[in-house]
Amino acid sequence: MENKTIARTLRLLSQLMELHEENPFKIKSIANAYFKVDKLPFALKDKPIEDIDKIDGIGKGLAGKIIELLQTGELKELNDIIQQTPEGVVDMLGIKGIGPKKILIIWRTLGIESIGELYYACNENRLIEAKGFGLKTQEEIKNAIEFKLAANGRFLYAQVEGFANTLHTQLSEWLVRFGSHSSLGFAGQYRRACEIIDELEFVIGTEHLEQVLASLESFEPLSLIAGVDAFITTTSAGLRVKIFVVDKADFYLQWFKQTGNAEHVEKVLQLAGNGPFANEEEIYSKAGLAFIEPELREDFDEIELAKANKLPTLIAYNDLKGSLHNHSTWSDGVHTLEQMAVYCKDTLNMQYFGICDHSKTAVYAKGLNEQRVFGQHREIDELNKKLAPFKIFKGIESDILSDGSLDYSDDILKTFDFVVASVHSNLRMDETKATARLLKAIENPYTTILGHPTGRLLLSRAGYPIDYKKIIDACASNNVVIEINANPLRLDLDWRWHRYALEKGVLLSVNPDAHRTEGFHDMRFGILVARKGGLSADKCLNAFSLEEITEYFNKKKG
DNA sequence: GCCGTTTTCGGCCCGACTGTTTTCAGTCG
């Protein structure tokens, strides 16, 4: 069992114990173990059993639970407490904005045992009767439930990726029985690299149409049913899968039709006429258009751009020369500064690494006070001697406080090579306040990059509303780069605003926000949405060479 | 339940913010 699963299990246990009002200190220590396990730099399953209770924060009791999980895959204590809790009450733990204390009141005082009932109670204005609840809380809960329900059957790209690739392989192997000449491709949202997927689509082109149509329902990994125009099913996790099967000669037309969104497809086909087409390139050339990459086929402005032959050359992962905005054990990261830098240098073959640990306001994340900033800078100076010509840039993820100021004085801010300014607190501002707050941070002469501009967590939290145009315009006039936070939960700045930012001359940066070496790989997801947004390598800060970015930072610092 | 000892049990405890209170509890990152 992976650390992550163990950590999640412990968190669930602590939350359920809170719902059953057990000893708060006991709960706290289990919750603490959840954080600790989540941040371990090694896998518990590889650790000798007798060493587990020597880990800081894990004593005899918790070691016992972890060993039980590792050996049996289950935890009796957890199973028991789940037994004593209505399923719907456990589900409520997934609603943002309410925690165990409020759920306890909802459950025990109001007698509500499911999210559906809770939603109903909000509409009937019944929540405000309970102690500690008022109109605002009721409204907040109602909104959070609506958000959660809207997320049903929808998945992050990263959540679907593994399943999608496995299925692709299985389908491709299965097709061999009909001869070796069939075509198979991803289509729809997945091929367009959408950040949210609710349907995974494939297109099969075959010379044996009748046979494939007759046997696809017996393709074992799925329980497909022949629908009107395709074979369909919904996985146990709730993801819809759709497989189109056509004659080999029609493959490219069908693949094209099932890839772009409906408007894009219709507009292009009006220009191109109907096939047959030997490949997708031919469709676009018959339409008098430059080839449009699948990621761009959203009926945004790509057809006009293709007509004028002004499509950008989309950035690729290999264009990246470094990674900015990363964390280490100096704050809430899992790996040390050196481990992170060396991984970036030797495994990823990058030229530079920007460290941006949390600033002092982020106490929960061990944010750096002024003294520790100096300490980290000394370590960076040493490492830079050791790792040259590879370069570690001194950065910080400075909290944007409620009034828009950064949380260090100018004297400290000027010691960094660059500053990522991000919001981590007071996330519920309205658009006017949140925009004013960001504007002030952007106008700070030390701000180099605006971090995750809206604070959204896809499928989980909407993020604060901002006036995008004002924010982007301000970045343009203050020479501030906007981050494309590459964490698959964030992907913030949203790709729909990349074009506007680029038009205004704003640079973007694909930042992994890595808290461990594996986290660097999230840059792949950042690149996918950056391509959707139309980013080219020359407009991406971390695609700059070491020489170029050094010059950029120096110039910005004046 | 963990830790750190005055080695057998007492102390453990982020700060800011919000909403609900009328002094504080719950939630968040």
Image (cartoon, helix red, strand yellow):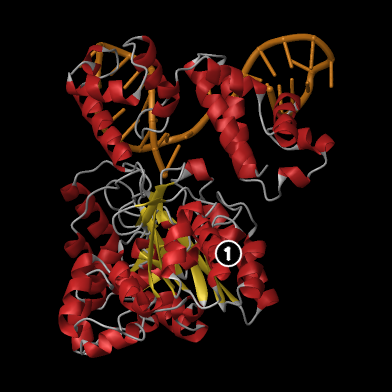
Tally the marks.
1
Residue A449 in sight: no
Q: Is residue A84 left or right of residue A273?
A: right
Which residue is drawn at the image coordinates 67% and 63% (left, top)? A339
- A467 shown above or below A269: above
For disc 1, the marked residue is A377
Viewer-nearest residue: A80 or A500? A80
Provide the secondary structure element on which disc 1 rests: helix
- A31 shown above or below A415: above
* Residue type, label 1: His
Q: Position of residue A72 (x, y in %)?
A: 72, 32
Residue A100 in sight: yes
Q: Quadrant of residue B8?
A: top right
Which residue is drawn at the image coordinates 41% and 20% (left, top)? A101
Which residue is drawn at the image coordinates 58% and 52% (left, top)? A333
- A156 shown above or below A320: above
- Graded by Cα atoms within 10 Å as few (under 14), some (14 to 19) or many (20 or more), the crowding at tag 1 reads some
Q: Position of residue A417 (x, y in %)?
A: 47, 71
Q: Quadrant of residue A551?
A: bottom left
Q: Is residue A295 left or right of residue A337?
A: left
Q: Is residue A43 left or right of residue A35?
A: right
Q: Position of residue A226 (x, y in %)?
A: 37, 53
Chain under numbered label 1: A
Q: Position of residue A218 (x, y in %)?
A: 51, 52
